């Protein structure tokens, strides 16, 4: 038997979360909140269940939710999307990414990704015979050299995948990045997948730049978003994909035979909850506070922190603490100091020179406090 993905093992988030549990360590590795979502949201979902919304939803998602999403994009970014033909509710951002990639990547097609990259892009591309062309970005600023991107473009390039804000880079794309991107794409047939699952989680008063703000990109872009990150409900696995009709048609061909549809009462609950804009407009403030708490604490340890521009992760350099490789260091830190993190080399195929680990700050202060107390012992 020839494995289709011979190099894929258990993903790093599962590995580290399990290891944290085994060693009774504070888990700042896998990205998920350890606090609950709004009771109001649970109430809306309960109400939907009581009303009998317990059967299949339409394949593309509950109409009311798609309409609320369209409204949100129009209000915030001034961009009109048709809720019938351009918005699809998916089983989390992951399924949207899977469906988008598998719908457009043929054997031999090239896909440009930026490393450090979230771990699922590469295996999905390779599963469908695509060839990954990676651009290596390095700490501390993970700046994109757009000339390098230009040099990677060939007549086989099918897709570019961006992640804004970046997990795990924690940097955001700027206007000038979009100008370069647009210039590269404008006279080509290359598509864009803009992974925006940490949408709104940007700091220091920065404006979040969704690809939806750039009308010239719209005609060729899949935008992927996640309610898990927006409303602290990663376990509900609900997200969506916005794309022009011709791309949405292709995405739905995969979506309908993969999951068919997403669970119904959650979608009704979300449609109701999404009406309250404060719930997501407050996210920068909510997470900036948590970021500050973790940064303050880490400042009195030998970790050198990279100030995150976005997402709910923070990267820290441990070169003053240890010479170990980052994977070994992450295991060591979990076992001996009872704090679990993610080694950043897991997000590169080959690049292992940095000494960086990723902390998640979507955690209660008491959780982070416990971790910080343990890390004080590193002095
Ligand atoms: N997105 C989360 C992270 O980056 C976890 C995803 C997962 O466990 N597959 O940590």
Image (cartoon, grey):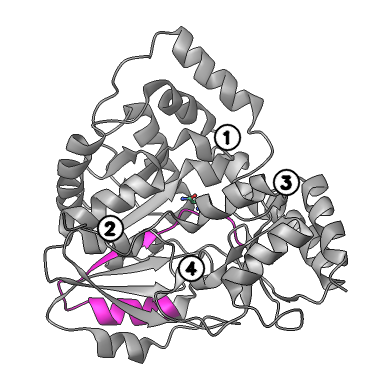
Gap in angstroms between the C-alphas marked 4 and 1: 37 Å
Residue carrying label 1: 276
Residue at position x 75%, y 55% in the image: 338
Q: Position of residue 1 (x, y in %)?
A: 16, 54
Label 3 or label 2, whichever lies nearer to me, is 3
Q: Position of residue 231 (x, y in %)?
A: 57, 39
Can residue 199 be seen here? The reply is no
Q: Is residue 141 above or below residue 268?
A: below
Q: Secondary structure at mark 4?
A: helix
Gap in angstroms between the C-alphas marked 2 and 4: 16 Å
Q: Nearer the viewer, residue 178 or 287?
A: 287
Residue carrying label 3: 24
Residue carrying label 2: 124
Q: Of marks 3 and 2, which one's residue comes earlier in the chain? A: 3
Classify 10 Å Cα crowding around label 2: few (below 14), some (14-19), many (20 and above): some
Can residue 236 be seen here? The reply is yes
Q: How many marks?
A: 4
Q: Is residue 90 above or below residue 174?
A: above
Gap in angstroms between the C-alphas marked 3 and 2: 33 Å
Q: Secondary structure at mark 3?
A: loop
Q: Secondary structure at mark 2?
A: helix
Q: Quadrant of residue 339?
A: bottom right
Gap in angstroms between the C-alphas marked 3 and 4: 23 Å
> Which residues are drawn in magenta?
177-204
Asked if the residue at label 1 sits under 8 Å from ligand 1, the reply is no
Residue at position x 87%, y 66% in the image: 377
> Disc 2 vs disc 4: Cβ atoms closer than 8 Å?
no
Label 2 or label 1, whichever lies nearer to me, is 2
């Amino acid at each position: 038997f020839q494995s289709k993905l011979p190099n894929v093992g258990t993903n790093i988030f599962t590995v580290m979360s399990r290891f944290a549990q085994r060693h009774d360590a504070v888990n700042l590795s896998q990205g998920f909140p350890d606090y609950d979502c709004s009771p109001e949201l649970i109430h809306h979902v309960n109400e939907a269940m009581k009303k009998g919304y317990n059967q299949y939803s339409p394949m593309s998602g509950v109409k009311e939710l798609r309409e609320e999403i369209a409204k949100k994009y129009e209000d915030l970014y001034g961009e009109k999307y048709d809720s019938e033909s351009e918005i699809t509710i998916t089983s989390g951002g992951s399924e949207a990414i899977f469906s988008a990639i598998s719908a457009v990547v043929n054997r031999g097609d090239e896909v440009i990704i930026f490393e450090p990259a979230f771990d699922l892009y590469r295996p999905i591309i390779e599963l469908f015979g695509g060839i990954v062309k990676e651009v290596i970005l390095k700490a501390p600023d993970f700046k994109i050299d757009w000339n390098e991107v230009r040099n990677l473009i060939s007549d086989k390039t099918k897709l570019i995948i961006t992640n804004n804000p970046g997990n795990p880079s924690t940097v955001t794309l700027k206007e000038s990045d979009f100008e370069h991107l647009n210039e590269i794409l404008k006279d080509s047939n290359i598509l864009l997948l803009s992974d925006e699952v940490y949408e709104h989680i940007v700091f220091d008063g920065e404006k979040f730049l969704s690809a939806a703000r750039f009308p010239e990109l719209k005609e060729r872009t899949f935008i992927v978003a996640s309610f898990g990150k927006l409303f602290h409900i990663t376990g509900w696995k609900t997200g969506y994909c916005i794309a022009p009709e011709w791309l949405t048609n292709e995405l739905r061909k995969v979506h309908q035979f993969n999951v068919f549809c997403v669970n119904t009462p959650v979608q009704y609950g979300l449609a109701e909850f999404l009406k309250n804009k404060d719930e997501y407009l407050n996210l920068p403030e909510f997470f900036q506070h948590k970021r500050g708490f973790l940064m303050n604490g880490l400042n009195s340890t030998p970790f050198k922190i990279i100030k995150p521009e976005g997402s709910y992760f923070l990267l820290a350099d441990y070169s003053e603490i240890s010479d170990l490789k980052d994977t070994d260091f992450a295991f060591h830190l979990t076992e001996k100091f009872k704090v679990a993190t993610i080694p950043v080399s897991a997000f590169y195929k080959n690049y292992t020179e940095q000494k960086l680990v990723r902390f998640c700050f979507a955690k209660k202060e008491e959780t982070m406090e416990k971790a910080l107390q343990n890390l004080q012992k590193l002095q």
